[in-house]
Image: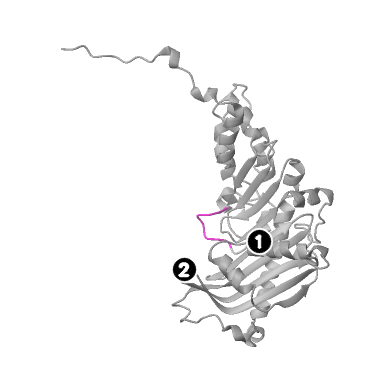
Amino acid sequence: MHAKARIHADPVLEFDRFDCLPDSLVLLILNKLEDVRSLGRCSAVSKRFSGLVPLVHDVCVKIDRVVTVDGDSDAALNLSSPKPQNILSHLLKLVLFAITKPFHDMGGNPNGAGRPLFPQLSQHSPAQVLRSFSHVRNIRVELPSGDVGVEEGVLLKWRAEYGSTLQNCVILGGTLVSRKAAGGVHEPPPDDGGTMPESFYTNGGLKLRVVWTISCLIAASTRHYLLRSIVDEHPTLRSLVLADADGQGALRMGWEQLRDFREHKPSASACSNRTQVPACNIKLRYAPCLELPGGLALQGATLLVIKPAGDGSGGGHGGRKEAEAFVSGAFDGPLRFAVKALMKRRTYLLEMNGF
């Protein structure tokens, strides 16, 4: 019988090849992760990673559960429970549990110092989680659900751009149905000129659109209020997005908007839990029914384009081009098709006072 051969590790090869990678390349890899939970786990791997994670440029914070400060975890709003009709009252008391659990589970620093990697996370707020990242440029915060409660079957989406105050907002709404359920109804022929049907005024259609507008603007201004400390504490920031898992709304701030935010501090509204919504001009476009790709139809399709009243940027050709680009690029897929179709409809002008 032949003796069994034994395989022994070559001591010369017993080293971590990952250590051969330069820090710049490791940072590129860490930037691809983005997710704050994954970055937290990486911080616990080694002393080197613990020093590199705070230097990443791109961070995404997904909030799985929201509770009030004086509540407990059993009262938390989470994605597995029935969707709340409105979480605006909870947003100002935002406390994170799930996103900080990886940090919480780290008993101590891998250096053996016995101190937490992120000691300031005891309060679990988004600003405190992000405070650990000193060179962050792009931040995305995702809430567990949309802010505006709607009836089943109603589609309501909004996108807003903010600096120190509202700059642009677009709202798309209607009832999303299959074409079979719509009974084969098609978009009104072009010769109707996009005229609003009389029933729109008499059956509460216009009132509903006003409610949508106010609700979305309140949601946007509340999110804007929540971002103050994040903007103040990250001078390297170039873009900031506060969205939700449902894809209902998204507030975006680019580099120019962030600079405006820092130079002209936003004013709080009278209720002090959101920033002031300025007086606005609203362009409303409506179609009784729009056929969308994929066998869908949008009944009562409505597009609302909102800009602050007296905004000088909308008067020039360049300002109009930027506003049109924002509206046309606000949504993807079938919703982009709906926006393009509605932009060809007749425009109705509305005015709204600030609040």
Q: Secondary structure at mark 1?
A: strand
350 lies above or below 114: below
Image coordinates of residue 20 in percent, x first then y, are: 54, 22
Is disc 2 surrounded by few (<14), some (14 to 19) or many (20+) residues within 10 Å? Answer: few
Direction from residue 222 to residue 76 in the image, left or right: left
Image coordinates of residue 215 in percent, x first then y, are: 68, 67
Q: What amino acid is at disc 2?
A: Gly
Q: Is residue 332 magenta?
A: no
Q: Return the mark for residue 159.
A: 1
Q: Main secondary structure of the magenta part?
A: loop
Q: What amino acid is at disc 1?
A: Arg
Q: Secondary structure at mark 2?
A: loop
The magenta segment is 77-84
Identity of the residue drawn at 69% across and 38% down: 131
The residue singled out by tag 2 in the image is 294
Question: In which quadrant of the rendered image does the C terminus lie?
Answer: bottom right
327 lies above or below 1: below
Query: Residue 207 falls in which quadrant of the image?
Result: bottom right
Query: Residue 245 falls in which quadrant of the image?
Result: bottom right
270 or 6: nearer the viewer: 6
Q: Is residue 79 magenta?
A: yes
Res 236 visible: yes
Identity of the residue drawn at 67% across and 84% down: 201
